Amino acid sequence: MNDWPEAWSDDSRGNRYGRGSTNAQPESARVMRQVRRGTGGPGGPRVAPPYGGVPQQPSYPDDQGYDGYNSGYNTGQVYGGPQGPGGGDPRGPRPAPNWRRRIKWTAITLVTVLVVTSVATYFWADSKLHRDVDLSKVIDRPAGGEGTNYLIVGSDSRAGMTAEDKKKLHTGSAEGKRTDTMMILHTGDNGSTLISLPRDSDVEIPTFKGSTSGKVYQGTGRHVKLNAAYAEDGPELLVRTVEFNTGLRIDHYAEIGFGGFAKIVDAVGGVEIAIDKGFKDKWSGADFKAGKQTLNGEQALAFVRTRHAFAASDLQRTKNQQKFLAALAHEVAAPSTVLNPFKFYPTAGAGLDSLTVDKDMSLWDLADMFWSMKGVSGGDGTSMNMPVSGSTGGNLVWDKAKVKTLVNELKNDEKVTVSGN
């Protein structure tokens, strides 16, 4: 009997699929046994398969182990996991999120990040401080008092400045270092007091130990301008001279040069200040109109250095220096700077790179100094010049009685009652 439909014979099909032929013909019913022909039998009429033309799949009795296959097939059941009554999750409904626990761990994570960042920032900042001044070399020092006294110095150091920088900032190219700014900042329980020491102040150079040689140089009663002490033997002799002529012990020393000062101002985006009366000075490059304005680094340096535009040159300059440095400290310590990492780190980096401090100065001391200067600018402290009684040979002579009262008040951390020039 011929098994092929429509009287095909096994030999008359020509090239056959599945027997080495390349013809793309479907396999026959003999090969694809799962495809069943109609029920008409051999030679009888063929009946169209049910289910819309798709051959019905064979069924298997339950006793052959296929019950799991038949019972779930095509019934809408989802395979791959356990099912509960009614098709639900046998584990029951998903529990509500534990928000208290989530908030707890979020807070712990944030605190950890904050602590790690703070510690890393502290060590980064501490490593950048230039602790080059050794106050242990200062001899015959007065006794300490209440509160803390900082000697803040602005020098005309041009270290690290290019020829273009010197030209832009009108600094000149003089060798060595001199002090354009000298201030005593006292901090204590009765507010802060910022006292400017005019560089033309008449002072006596006392007996001192050389900072490099270690040799003791006996005092001869020689009188010079205060800034000459720094030029002669650096910060240690300047501290020794201030202590000898005032009787006030200096606890910490901080110095910044021309270039560093300008960089700090630029890093904070400039400093706003109100100028009472406009002035010009070709020597410093100053050219200011009266009114409130924001100064960049170049303008700020010109503002604090100008002296030739004023009749009382050194006294007016110290007032301008106090005014600007207090405003700068206020800007540096402002939340918009401290809480903004894109502003804080450039500002801190510029300041720390430019500062020279004593060996015992810590970051906490430095922070206290800036916060105290901010307090002065905010009205929580006193700003003044050292009291002056007259002049001799072009040098400003301090008022000895007022200076004695002022120093006693600072030593005892009392409210300052003395007024300056």
Image (spheres, rainbow, N blue to C red):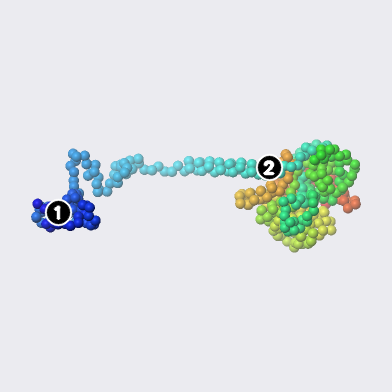
Q: Residue 277 is drawn in which quadrant?
A: bottom right
| Secondary element at tag 2 | helix
Amino acid tagged 2: Leu
Q: Residue 147 is drawn in which quadrant?
A: top right
> Label 2: which residue?
363
Label 1 or label 2, whichever comes before in sequence order: 1
- Residue drawn at the location 81% of the way across and 60% of the way down: 309
Amino acid tagged 1: Asp
Give the x, y percent position of residue 316: 81, 55
- From mark 1 to mark 2, how far is it between C-alphas? 101 Å
**Nearer-the-camera pick, 54 or 415:** 54
Mark 2 crowd level (few <14, some 14–19, many ≥20, 10 Å Cα): some
Q: Looking at the image, can residue 158 be seen?
A: yes
> Label 1: which residue?
10
Asked if residue 308 lies left or right of residue 331, the reply is right
| Secondary element at tag 1 | loop
Asked if residue 241 lies left or right of residue 65, the reply is right
